[in-house]
Amino acid sequence: MATNPMQRKARNSFLLGMLLMLVITGLIIAFLFMQLINKTKKEQEQLKQQTQAYVLNQDVSSGQVITEDMLEPKTVNKTLVPSNATSDIDLIKNYALQDKEGNDIITKYDNNVPKLYVKKDNHDFELQKEDETDNYYIERNGAKEYLELNSVPLVAKVTMKKNTLITTELLSKSDNVVQDDMRKQEYNMIVLPMDLTNGDYIDIRLLLPSGQDYIVTSKKEVTLPNVDGSDSEDTIWLNLTEDEILHMSCAIVDAYKINGSKLYATKYTEPGMQDASTPTYPLGGPATRLLESDPNILERAMNELSNRYNNTNAADLRNNYIDSVINEQGEQSSSNEETKMQESITNSKNSRKKYLDSLTGEIE
């Protein structure tokens, strides 16, 4: 049946419109397909650039001990993290290892495989593990030499915020390694810095009226008892070894005997990066004899003290400065000692009562 020109024109217009729509739809589909391919390619590239690294899950201050629960793995872009960031928590744990002699355990890479080494006699020995016993050993002179390993607390070198990527360069090994003879001691006769807070590190020093200023014990982390919901004003807790306790006892007696002396604390500004000061306070004769005779003191501690203090220079310091000042004051030194000791006892009892009262209030 013949169609009129109007019908043919309408049909041709319809077919042309359909063709154009199909072309446009095809172009849109092709464009979207290319976009999808590009997006997938970009995502794959991003996945290749991603890695896991351990970050802090809280803020920490310089000198604060870093524990495993303070670290968590996080997916990050490789290009935004240092090459020494790690996704293996064992590398951080290994960094904390030492042998019984205090030699550090270090990690070296062999074809991207981490291996542990210990330095002895200026030589690095590979640390190996015996499958049958799980004991660690090194091979030296053709024989196995077994090692006992300890984990040393790791501390932050600097103050760091939450989500900071952790590397071993940001950590250091704590000076305050827990020893068998370490005890928690309470003191309330030390002049404290005004802004002293929990977790600060301090040196205890003895200042004499003649100008001598001795370091009694160094780089100790402070704990402040909480009394009635606030930190104690005059009482601190320190973890000290037996020899450090004896040093403190001797210094306290000297401070009480010498009128015008001061036993005080000084803060470390960056404890994570600063090494402990070397104690310079020489022990008195009675305290030294007690240290040498007490069976509870570790042999290593006694040897260290013998090397550090039982020499001519330390004896001269003691005789020329501390003992001579005590002798010059005569009976007055005994009076000072009795008065100050009673003040200390009273302060200690009052602080203890407040602390116990605060604990009772919390329970109620």
Image: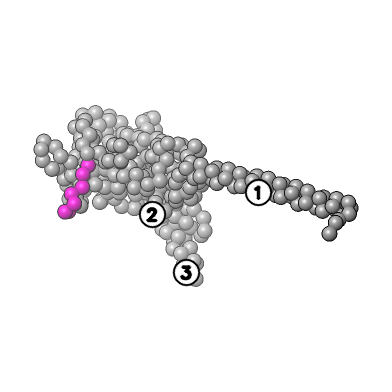
Magenta part, dominant SS? loop
Please tell me which of labels 3 and 1 falls first in the chain.
1
Q: Distance of mark 1 from mark 2, alpha carbons?
A: 88 Å
Where, by quadrant of the figure, is residue 261 drawn?
top left
Cα gap from disc 2 to disc 3, whole angstroms: 27 Å
Residue type indicated by callout 3: Ile
Residue name at image x 68 percent, y 45 percent: 27
> Mark 2 falls on what kind of element?
helix
**Contact flag, marks 1 and 2 (Cβ < 8 Å):** no
Mark closer to the chain start, 2 or 3: 2
Q: Quadrant of the N terminus?
A: bottom right
Q: Secondary structure at mark 1?
A: helix
Residue wearing tag 1: 29
Amino acid carrying label 2: it is: Ile
Residues in magenta, as a range: 127-133
Secondary structure under tag 3 reads helix
Mark earlier in primary sequence (1, 2): 1
Q: Where in the figure is residue 211, as x and y percent of width and height?
A: 39, 30
Query: Which residue position is annotated with label 2?
Result: 345
Q: Residue furthest left?
A: 142
Discs 3/1, front = 1
- Relative to the observer, which residue lies in front, 78 or 199? 78
Q: Amino acid at mark 1?
A: Ile
Name which residue lies at 10% across and 38% down. 142
Q: Is residue 188 left or right of residue 110?
A: right
Is residue 339 visible to us here? no
**Residue at (85% x, 56% y) in the render:** 2
Between 352 and 228, which is closer to the camera in this rendering? 228
